[in-house]
Image (cartoon, helix red, strand yellow):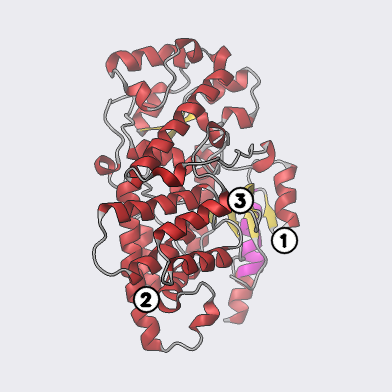
Amino acid sequence: MMKAKLAEWTAAGYHFNLDWLLRSVNTVLTGEAKFQHLHDKGADEVQDALKRANKHIDTCLNLISGRLGLDHDRVFFGRFGVPVMVRYLDQHQGSMDEKERDKLLFWFVQAGMWGRFSGSTESYIDQDLAALDGPDGGLDKLIEQLRLWHGGLRTEPGHFGGWSLGARFYPVLYLITRMGQARDWGTGLPLKASLLGKMSRLDVHHIFPKAQLYKRDYKKTVVNALANFCFLTKDTNIDISDTLPEEYFPEVERAHPGALASQWIPDDKSLWKIENYPAFLEARKALLADEMNKRMEDLLHGDTRWLAGATAPAVEQPDTIGGITSEKEEELLEAINEWVEEMGLPRGELSYDFADPSTGEQRAVFDLAWPNGIQEELSQPVAVLLNEGADVISIASQAGYRCFTTPDAFRDYVQSDILVQESSSA
């Protein structure tokens, strides 16, 4: 039953594993994160909890996809927030009103943004379950606990200072694109979730083309800055190609007035020139932060006390953090995952957020990782790191990961170490 349900979610664009699903079964049945609490439960109890968990997970995915626009795996951050949401839904039978629904989604987004579950997952799930239960428990206490843990919950321009598709705020950029009025620059049509359905192939577009920036000796981290990303349809992305903004922006504005502003492009035309690229990034980060705060205020329906007070300072993402920087890299990594599945082994996590276990602060992004090993709990953690520097490889190695820098080396390892062990144990 569990594998069939996981396959159903995979077909919808979400790759989850058995550990994640069992965690939700556990929270439904025991109100705890640790699996030891399942030990004294009978088969009938577990089966009933699985049915309830499946139903509530479906509800969560529909809410997250429909209301937040996070409609596929690459932008589904904070996935271990779902077992907490599942517990809340199971304990509060009946339909939610709009305010309650949106407050739950507000917590989910905030937990993902600040890496609540990127560190010590079990302990944080347990803390959040405890905040929900008890006579004074509920969503307000859950959000307050998150605010006490992280600090202020408002977004600042510096939070959009990351780079690569592994940046914490990459899903946030996707979220505001889908929740807001962002429009495609080729067709002028809105990129809303309701219009796109499950269209996960919105392309990441570099506003200032990579080739043009590399010609001017910008570093990879600056070329792939989050504030240089937007989302467009594939056709539009191809049509723009390597044209500079000062050339194609006026054409977009003539054909589709307001489409540039809908994607948070500064209206100061001097910032459209490539010589002013750094100033463009700073101006756009401020516009993105304003938009994110508006979207969070919308979810709170005017109860903005959660966004009041001092904001935790943005931690500058180090140049050495790593991450996927091109479609070619992403295609290579997807091909590895598909091959691993064909071998009957579990997929790895793309853009794995490796964080400090106590603070949740992002330390590195591993292109593709199996943090519990390809044979879970039986083999060492593994990371595939394409085109990464020595610093990222060093962080992974020190954390106990076996690192591979080419697809061929990784496949050789799987065939010589993992598959051989599997066949001998069979």
Instruction: Looking at the image, tell me whether mark 2 or mark 1 is earlier in sequence order.
Output: 2
SS for callout 1 = loop
* Residues under numbered marks 3 and 2 in contact, where contact means CB atoms less than 8 Å apart: no
The residue beneath circle 2 is: 50
**Mark 3 and mark 2: span between their CA atoms?**
37 Å
Residue 148: where, in percent of width, then height?
Answer: 55, 53
**Which residue: 65% across, 62% down?**
381
Up the image or down, 126 lies above or below 309; here it is: below
Q: Label 3 amino acid?
A: Pro
On-image quarter of the C terminus: bottom right
Front disc: 3 or 2: 2
Up the image or down, 211 lies above or below 43; here it is: above
Instruction: Looking at the image, tell me whether mark 1 or mark 3 is earlier in sequence order.
Output: 1
Q: Which residues are magenta?
A: 406-418
Image disc number at residue 400: 1
Q: Label 2 amino acid?
A: Leu
The residue beneath circle 3 is: 407
Front disc: 1 or 3: 1
Query: Of helix, strand and loop, which mostly describes the magenta segment?
Result: helix
Up the image or down, 40 lies above or below 381; here it is: below
